[in-house]
Image (tube, rainbow, N blue to C red):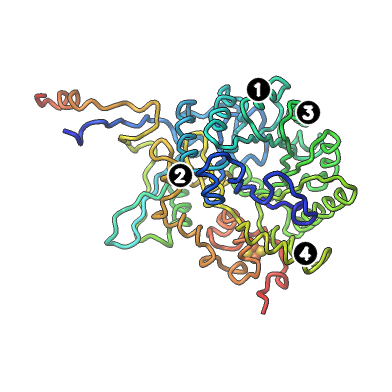
Amino acid sequence: MAEQSNWSRVGEQPRDAVDREWEVFVRSETTDPLQHVGSVSAPTIEAARTQATALFGRYATDLWLCPAADVRRYSRTTIDERAVSIDPAKERDERGHSA
Amino acid sequence: MISISKLLCGLDAEGDGLRYDAAGESAKPQITDHKQRRPVVVWNLTKQCNLSCSHCYAAADTETADGELTTEEGRRVLDDLADYGVPVVLFSGGEPLVRDDLPELIEYADASGIRPVLSTNGTLVTPDIARELREAGLKYAGISVDGLPERNDAFRGRDGAFDAAVRGIRACLDAGLKTGLRYTITERNAADLPAVVALLHDEGVDRFCFYHLDYGGRGAGIVDADLSPEEKRAAVKQLCDLTRRYHDHDDEIETLLVGNYADAAYLVEYAREHLSEARAERIDDYLRRNGGDPTGERVADIDYQGNVHLTQFWQNYSLGNVRDRPFSALWDDESNPLLRALRSREQRLSGRCADCQYQNICRGASRLRALAVHDDPFAPDPQCYLREDEIAPTV
Ligand code: SF4
C-alpha cells in the first residue's frame, strides 16, 4: 500500500540545549483546525505558556503545548541522518497480521 | 545593518547598503533575480565555545549540544538555502571553528553560489587556519572584541582573549581575508570604543561593526548592563563624530551599526544638525529603501540543532526545525500568524512607534527587546533613544 511506504521515523535528537522545548499549537476560531506554529524554549510548562501567549495569545482561542521530546515524528522527506526507515511488512508481522 | 560611514561620509564600500540584503554579491542567477527578497541566514554551527562571554545570545558553553546538525545534514540545508536564493550564510556559534568541518561547509556554500562569511571570537585562528578558510572560499571574517584588554577579557571570561583575538585578526589579514571588528556596546565597555578602534586600525582593520545588545540568550540576563537610552544616544553620536574625524583625515574606515534601527532615525537627525537638511533628506531616502528592522524578513537564524529563528538573538522561539521541514518552506509559511504580523508590523506597532515619523525607516526597532520588557512583540522598543519632538509626525 503506497500510503504505508517510504516513511521514516525522525531521529529522537534533542531540539533544546538550554531549556526544554515545547511545541505550540493554536486555533484562532472554534471552527478552525489546530495549527502548529513552532516551539518555545522554557524551563517549565508555566513559563512556556507565558511565552506562547505573549507571542500567539492575540491570534488564538485555543493554545496547546506539548513537550517536543514527547512527539513522535514520521516523515517522507526528512533530512535527518538518524531517521529510521519504517518497514511496513515488518510492522504488520509485529502486529500479528499475515503479510 | 546601518552604515554610518556610507551615510555620513559617502563611502562606497563593498556591498554597502545591502548588508543583510547582500543579494547582489552572489553569482547565482536566481539570487540576483530575488535581490533583497531572501534573508541572510545566520547558522549557529555549534553550541560549543572555548570562551564564556557574558552577553552570548547563543548561551554557548564548553560542550557540544546533543543533536547538532551533521556535515551531511548541513549540506542538505545549504542546498535548500541555495535553491531558495539565500545570498549570504553567516557561520556562527558558539565558536564555529571548534567544528572540523567548517572549511568543508564554507566550500560547499561557496560552490552553491552562497556567500560564506564567518563570525568568530578569533582566538582559534592561526595563520594556517586563516589560509585554509580563505582557500575554502570564505569572503569575510568578523572577529569579536568587546573593549580594551582587561575589560574584554573579563567580559569574555578568559585572560589573554584580547591578545589572542588580535593575533587572529592579524592572521586573517595576512591571509588576505577581509576582516572586521564586532563590538557589542554595553554600559561596561562604551568608554573603550574610540581606543579599540584606534588600536585595531593600527593593526590594519578598517571595518568596525557595533552591535547593540539584544535581549536573548545570556544577553537577557544582562539587560541591566545595557546602556540607558540617553547613554546609547551618546555612544552612537560618539561613533558618528569618530567616523567623520577619520574620514576628515582621509582614513576611510567603515563603521556600521547593528541591532537598533532607531539608529536610522538618529542618523537623519544627526545629519540635519551637523551636515545639512539636503543631506538629511538623502539619508532618509536611502534608509527608506533599506527597509528598517529585518527581523523575520531579511535575516534568519538556524541553530545548531536545526531550529529556525526570526533572528539570531531570538533563540527562545522557533518557527520549526529543518529536520522536519526545509528552511524555505518554514520561511514562506505565512499561515503562521506571528510571522505574518511581523511582516506587516506597521499596522500593529503601538505606543510611541505607532505615529513615529521615522516608522518607515526603523519599523519599531527590536521586537525582541519589546517582547522581553513589555511581554508584547508589538510594544515600543525600550531602547529607542529618540526624543518625543524628533519622532512627532510632521504636518
Ligand atoms: S519611536 Fe519606534 S519607530 Fe520611532 S524611532 Fe523609536 S523605535 Fe523607531
For residue B132, which numbered disc appears in the image?
1
Mark 1 or mark 2: which is in front?
1
In the depicted structure, whether residue B28 falls above or below residue B353: above
Q: Is residue B159 visible?
A: no
For residue B279, which numbered disc appears in the image?
4
Give neighbour class at mark 2: few <14, some 14-19, many 20+ (Cα, 10 Å).
Answer: few
Mark 4 or mark 3: which is in front?
4
Mark 2 or mark 4: which is in front?
4
Spot the residue most to the front: B29
Figure quarter occupied by ligand 1: bottom right
Quote the CA–CA distance across marks 2 and 4. Answer: 52 Å
Give neighbour class at mark 1: few <14, some 14-19, many 20+ (Cα, 10 Å).
Answer: some
Question: In the rendered structure, are the residues bearing label 1 and label 2 in contact, judged by CB atoms less than 8 Å apart?
Answer: no
Q: Is residue B239 left or right of residue A49?
A: right
**Mark toward the start of the polypeptide (4 vs 3):** 3
Quote the CA–CA distance across marks 1 and 2. Answer: 44 Å
Residue under the point 82% across and 50% down: B243
The quadrant holding residue A79 is top left
The x and y percentages for residue B94 are 60, 33
In the depicted structure, whether residue A29 falls above or below residue B148: below
Quote the CA–CA distance across marks 1 and 4. Answer: 43 Å
Spot the residue most to the top: B128
Residue beneath label 3, please? B170
